[in-house]
């Protein structure tokens, strides 16, 4: 594993610091995702004539995709050791696979919460993010990166 140092502290083998940093990365990625979802749902696409279901799914997919890129890059800098378990091509393929499955979970939960249960979209988005973050962390830690 490559050496991990932050503010002069070597935390390469310190799992507690890595978990705290993962929560920071995940928390800021969630804020990015929620902010983008809000922007797409209420401002960018609100007046384009989409149905509520379509608007919810499009805003969810775009926000999730952009926040996943943010999470991938920041997570590789602070938490995971990119390229140490697999070559970059395989690693990137696995990240896309995990992300696509995470997006499918996001879309499914949003569709159920907003489309079937008539929850307020932003509440549904926050709850959905909390569910999907468990999938994201476990799959990246177990199958893609060394941490």
Image (spheres, grey):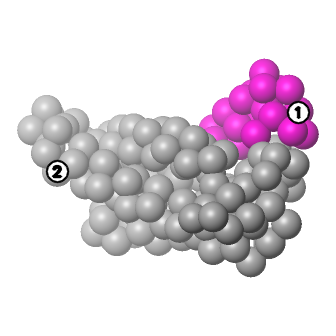
- Name the spot of residue 45 as percent of width and height, x first: 19, 38
| Crowd rating for badge 2 (residues with CA inside 10 Å; few <14, some 14–19, many 20+) | few
Residue nearest the viewer, comparing 4 with 135:
4
* Residue ID at (13%, 32%): 48
Mark number, residue 42: 2
- Name the spot of residue 6 as percent of width and height, x first: 61, 61
* Residue ID at (30%, 65%): 122
Magenta stretch, main secondary structure, is: helix
State the CA–CA distance, disc 2 to disc 1: 40 Å
Q: Where 82 sits versus 9, above or below?
A: above
Residue nearest the viewer, comparing 59 with 108:
59
Residue 120 at least partly seen: yes
**94 with respect to 6 (left or right):** right
Identify the image quadrant of residue 22: bottom right
The reply to whether callout 2 and callout 1 are in contact (CB within 8 Å) is no
Upstream in the sequence, badge 2 or badge 1?
Answer: 2
Tell me the element at label 2: helix
Tell me the element at label 1: loop
Identify the image quadrant of residue 110: bottom left
Residue extent of the magenta highlight: 82-100
Q: Report the residue marked by disc 1.
A: 86
- Name the spot of residue 30 as percent of width and height, x first: 45, 60
Q: Residue furthest top?
A: 89
């Amino acid at each position: 594993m490559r050496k991990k140092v932050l503010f002069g502290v070597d935390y390469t083998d310190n799992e507690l610091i890595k978990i705290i940093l993962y929560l920071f990365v995940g928390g800021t990625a969630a804020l990015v995702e929620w902010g983008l979802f809000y922007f797409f749902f209420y401002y960018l696409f609100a007046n384009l004539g989409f149905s509520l279901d379509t608007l919810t799914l499009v805003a969810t997919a775009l926000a999730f995709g952009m926040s996943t890129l943010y999470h991938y890059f920041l997570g590789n800098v602070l938490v995971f050791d990119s390229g140490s378990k697999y070559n970059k091509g395989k690693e990137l393929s696995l990240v896309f696979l995990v992300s696509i499955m995470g997006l499918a979970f996001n879309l499914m939960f949003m569709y159920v919460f907003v489309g079937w249960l008539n929850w307020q979209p932003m509440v549904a988005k926050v709850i959905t993010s909390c569910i999907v973050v468990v999938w994201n962390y476990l799959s990246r830690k177990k199958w893609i990166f060394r941490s």
